[in-house]
Image (cartoon, helix red, strand yellow):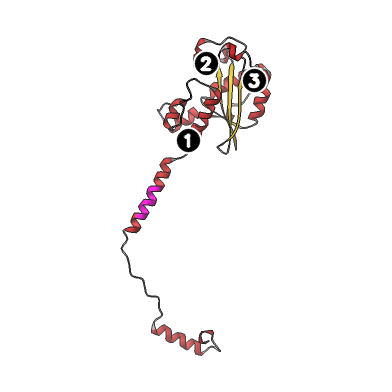
Amino acid sequence: MREIVLDTETTGLDPGSGHRIVEIGCIELVNHVPTGETFHQYINPERPMPVEAYEVHGLDDAFLGQFPVFADIAQAFLTFLEDAKLVIHNAGFDMRFLNAELSMIGQPTLPMRRAIDTVQLARSRFPGAQASLDALCRRFEIDNSARTKHGALLDAELLADVYLELIGGRQPDLELSAGARRQETVEQSDNRPLRPARPHGPTAEELAGHGQLLEKLEDPIWNR
């Protein structure tokens, strides 16, 4: 089973207002195991970077201006995705931006049914608790100290760890329970009273019956 953990950075919150993607980061999972294969691309948004967005990810016009536009990287991006499920934190946001970019260049859009939303997974598992990426990293004790600003590839790496915990992960509670059960079994066996071994030798009556049977046999092996 192939899945792609995906994150984007953008110039703002709404593609309908002309905001664009400026970074895409992807991590490949096969059977829930990271393979080491990644896709990472900065993108020239062809528009100025608002101050508010710059403060989130630190990507400015001068830096992004040296990278290709989305149309030039779209095919490589889609080739990396293939038909994999897409693991995304707040999937509706990223999918709206990706589909807006794809629509602008005449490419088919990505159906929402391909997306696994880790925000929804977190809210289902921990109702009422914070579901931000930072909050989930704290909950699962995942080191996010390098996340001084948002970055698509770093956030995808952190999200991959969070996702694996959300769907089962290390399950330390189950390991502790199993250990406790093993310890309880040992203690119970140590406290059992010792019983004398039961006798297994034949009785005199059984020996006599066996002898009578041998007399009826021709050259029985028991007499050799």
Q: Residue at x 43, y 27 (%)?
A: 135
157 or 79, which is in the foreground?
157
**Mark 1 or mark 3, which has the lower sequence index?**
3
Residue 183 belongs to the span the image colors magenta: yes
Quadrant housing residue 10: top right
Up/down of 221 relative to 91, above or below? below
Distance from disc 2 to disc 3, alpha carbons, whole Å, reads 25 Å
* Image disc number at residue 58: 2
Amino acid identity at mark 1: Glu
What span is in magenta? 179-186
**Quick one: SS at disc 3?**
helix
Amino acid identity at mark 2: Gly
Q: Residue 41: where, in percent of width, then height?
A: 61, 22
Q: Residue at x 40, y 78 (%)?
A: 201
**Quadrant of the rendering where the N terminus is positioned:** top right
* Image disc number at residue 165: 1
The 10 Å Cα crowd at callout 2, few under 14, some 14 to 19, many 20 or more, is: some
Q: Which residue is labeled 3 in the image?
A: 102
Q: Nearer the viewer's eye, disc 1 or disc 3?
A: 1
Residue 200 seen in the figure: yes
Residue 117 seen in the figure: no
Amino acid identity at mark 3: Leu
Circles 2 and 1, Cβ within 8 Å, touching? The answer is: no
Quadrant housing residue 68: top right
**Quick one: SS at disc 1?**
helix
**Horizontal relation, residue 184 to residue 12: left or right:** left
**Mark 2 or mark 3, which has the lower sequence index?**
2
**Mark 2 or mark 1, which has the lower sequence index?**
2
Q: Nearer the viewer's eye, disc 2 or disc 3?
A: 2
The 10 Å Cα crowd at callout 3, few under 14, some 14 to 19, many 20 or more, is: some
Distance from disc 1 to disc 3, alpha carbons, whole Å, reads 32 Å
Circles 1 and 3, Cβ within 8 Å, touching? The answer is: no
